[in-house]
Image (spheres, rainbow, N blue to C red):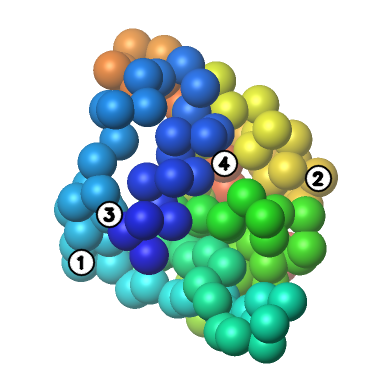
């Protein structure tokens, strides 16, 4: 999964130099989180990792959702998000780098609501929330 994490970040985060993303970043990124893996069979019927999601369970915060480029658009990310929504208390939250407009559109299409933006950090982000039930 470390290789998938590194390669997808290099492809998606085009505003950064590719060499910024290291193989060992993955282990730091998911430390203390629950990680679920999506596995699919490739054209040769060999199982391969198509993506993963990591959630910091104490706060229902989705820290990572990464799908291999060849599996993007096949519903894998949506299935991983649905599983997280079933297993963790709502609302769930996540952050998206403000430069990642594709991800912003994706989450908004799925019903996530932007509840804040912080441009003062080293990596500015939008904060999203998902709540499927009625608010009290």
Q: Earlier in the sequence, mark 3 or mark 1?
A: 3
Question: Of 96 and 8, which appears nearest the observer?
Answer: 8
Q: Name the residue: 73% across, 77% down.
A: 43
Q: Which residue is mark 2?
A: 109
Q: Which residue is mark 1?
A: 32
Above or below, 38 relative to 8: below
In the image, which disc is placed on residue 26?
3
Question: Residue 55's spot in the image, x, y percent?
Answer: 39, 64
In front: label 2 or label 3: 3
In the image, which disc is placed on residue 49?
none
Q: CA distance from mark 1 to mark 2?
A: 29 Å
Q: Name the residue: 20% across, 66% down.
A: 32
Q: Are marks 2 and 4 in contact (CB under 8 Å)?
A: no
Q: Which residue is mark 4?
A: 128
Q: Earlier in the sequence, mark 4 or mark 3?
A: 3
Q: Tell me if mark 3 has few (under 14), some (14-19) or many (20+) residues whose alpha carbon lies within 10 angstroms of its own.
A: some
Q: Residue furthest front?
A: 44
Give the quadrant of the C terminus.
bottom right
Mark count: 4
Question: Residue 65's spot in the image, x, y percent?
Answer: 51, 55
């Amino acid at each position: 999964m470390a290789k998938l994490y590194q390669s997808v970040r290099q492809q998606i985060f085009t505003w950064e130099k590719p060499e910024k993303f290291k193989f060992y970043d993955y282990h730091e990124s998911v430390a203390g989180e629950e990680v679920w893996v999506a596995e699919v069979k490739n054209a040769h019927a060999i199982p391969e990792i198509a993506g993963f999601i990591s959630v910091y369970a104490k706060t229902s915060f989705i820290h990572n959702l990464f799908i291999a480029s060849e599996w993007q658009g096949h519903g894998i990310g949506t299935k991983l998000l649905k599983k997280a929504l079933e297993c963790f208390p709502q609302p769930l939250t996540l952050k998206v780098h403000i430069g990642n407009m594709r991800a912003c559109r994706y989450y908004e299409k799925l019903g996530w609501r932007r509840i804040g933006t912080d441009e003062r950090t080293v990596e500015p982000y939008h904060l999203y929330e998902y709540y499927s039930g009625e608010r009290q």
